[in-house]
Structure formats: structure tokens, C-alpha cells
Image (spheres, rainbow, N blue to C red):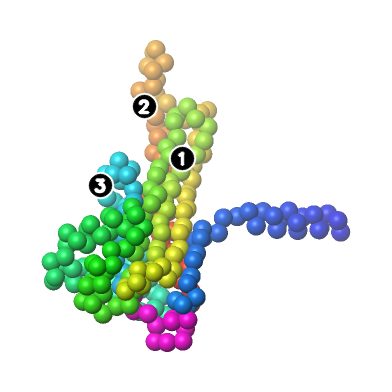
Amino acid sequence: MRRLILAVMVLASLTGCKKQHPVSVYVDPKFTEAQTDGPGVKIAVTQFASSLNPTDDPDQEAPRMMERFLDPALQARRDYKFIAPNTVQYAIDQNQWGDEYKKFLRSYALSDKPDLAFLGKLSAALQCDAFLIPVVDLWQKDEVDMQENSSAATYVGATLTIVDAKSGAMLFRATDEDYIEGARSETADRSLVTSSSGAVRADLGERLYKAPPFEDVAAKVALALAGSLPVR
């Protein structure tokens, strides 16, 4: 009996230590009340912003990829009234607010402060009550050296925030970070082609031990963030 109790305690401790996704969630009670008691808040979804250093994402791949996974995940939430990013972009183009929009996204990603003047006129054009602003803040691959006994890994992190269109007050925020490890590399298993002097000319197993693609982790993070919104 004591062994059984000990086993249950160990299992419970392991479960308790397991990282939850999203990592953190904040919900303003007023947001929950508005979604539950009334017709619901009409939310415009902006493009993904990025707080990444340009050297970490020189081709700006991260926001585009995250948006590709987050948008359909949000649209699957039938309990919310979302205005899709392409509709927001149409309003931006119609009013020639492209430069302001880019400046707003970059400024928000770095300062966490919404530009109320810009959001005010954009909300009037879209007839929305709030904005959902997603920001990608972690985009990293840790590769394994051929002389290492370790596993390569890919890391992705993002934050989803809903702000009131008039006041800029935070109504909701969810943050998530996740990773996937690749195959473990053992130096004894690596197929290296060396010269007579011992210099490595080629690593035949290089592709096998590469860090997983960003897509695999980005999809997990996007689904976790979309699923974190309280059910209406």
C-alpha cells in the first residue's frame, strides 16, 4: 500500500512540474462579462508584430508564419466575432494608412503601448470594439555540434493581447513558449568523412540531427494561444 501511495505521489509531482500551455493568461473580468452577458465584443485582428532582433529573423519569416497558423485557429472559434487581418489590411489600404500601420505594429511590439490615436480612427473604419494584437518574441534554433552529445532544438514564443479600441486598456493577454527537440546526437554515431590529417570534410548525418523546422513549433504555439480565449 505504501508503495502504491509513493508511486501516486511521484506521478502527481511530475504532472505538477509539467509546463502548461499557454504559459500565462490574464483576463479582465469586464471582458468576460461583456462576452457572456451581451452580444459580444467585435475584435479586429491585426497582423503579427515582431519584437525580435533583425539578426534573429532577417527575412521576417516569423510573423508571416505565425499568422498563417493563428488566423485559421482564431476563425475556428465560432464563439467570437473576429475581423480577419486581411479585412483590417483592406481598411488600411483604402485609407492609405500603410506607413502608420507598420509604425504602430513595431512600436507596440517594443513598447507594449498602443497608439490610441491610430487605433481610434482604425476602429471607426472597422466598426470594432477591440483589437487583438499578436507579437512573436522568441524564434530560435539551437543546433548541435558534430562533437556534442546532445539534441538540437527549436524554440518559438508569442504573446496575444486584446486591447479596448477606445481606452487601450488590456482586456486579455496570453503568452506561450514551446520547443521541439530533434534526434539526439552521439559522437560515436556520427558518420564523418575525414582527411588523412583528421580534418572533417563532411558529416553524412548532418541533416538527421538538425533542429526541427519552425513550422512544427509555431503551429503548437498558435493553437495554444487561440485556445486560451475564455469560452463564451
In the displayed structure, would residue 89 be above or below residue 199?
A: below
The percent coordinates of residue 21 (x first, y second) are: 51, 60
Write the residue at 21% across / 76% down: 125
Instruction: Using the rendered view, name the quadrant where residue 121 is placed.
Output: bottom left
Q: Magenta includes 37?
A: yes
Write the residue at 46% across / 40% down: 152
Distance of mark 1 from mark 3, alpha carbons?
22 Å
Which residue in the protein does label 3 denote?
59
Amino acid bearing label 2: Ala
The percent coordinates of residue 187 (x first, y second) are: 51, 28
The secondary element bearing badge 1 is classed as strand
Left or right relative to 221: residue 45: left
Which residue in the protein does label 2 denote?
202
Amino acid bearing label 1: Ala
Q: Nearer the viewer, residue 40 or 224?
A: 40
Residue 110 seen in the figure: yes
- Span highlighted in magenta in the image: 33-43
Which residue in the protein does label 1 denote?
152
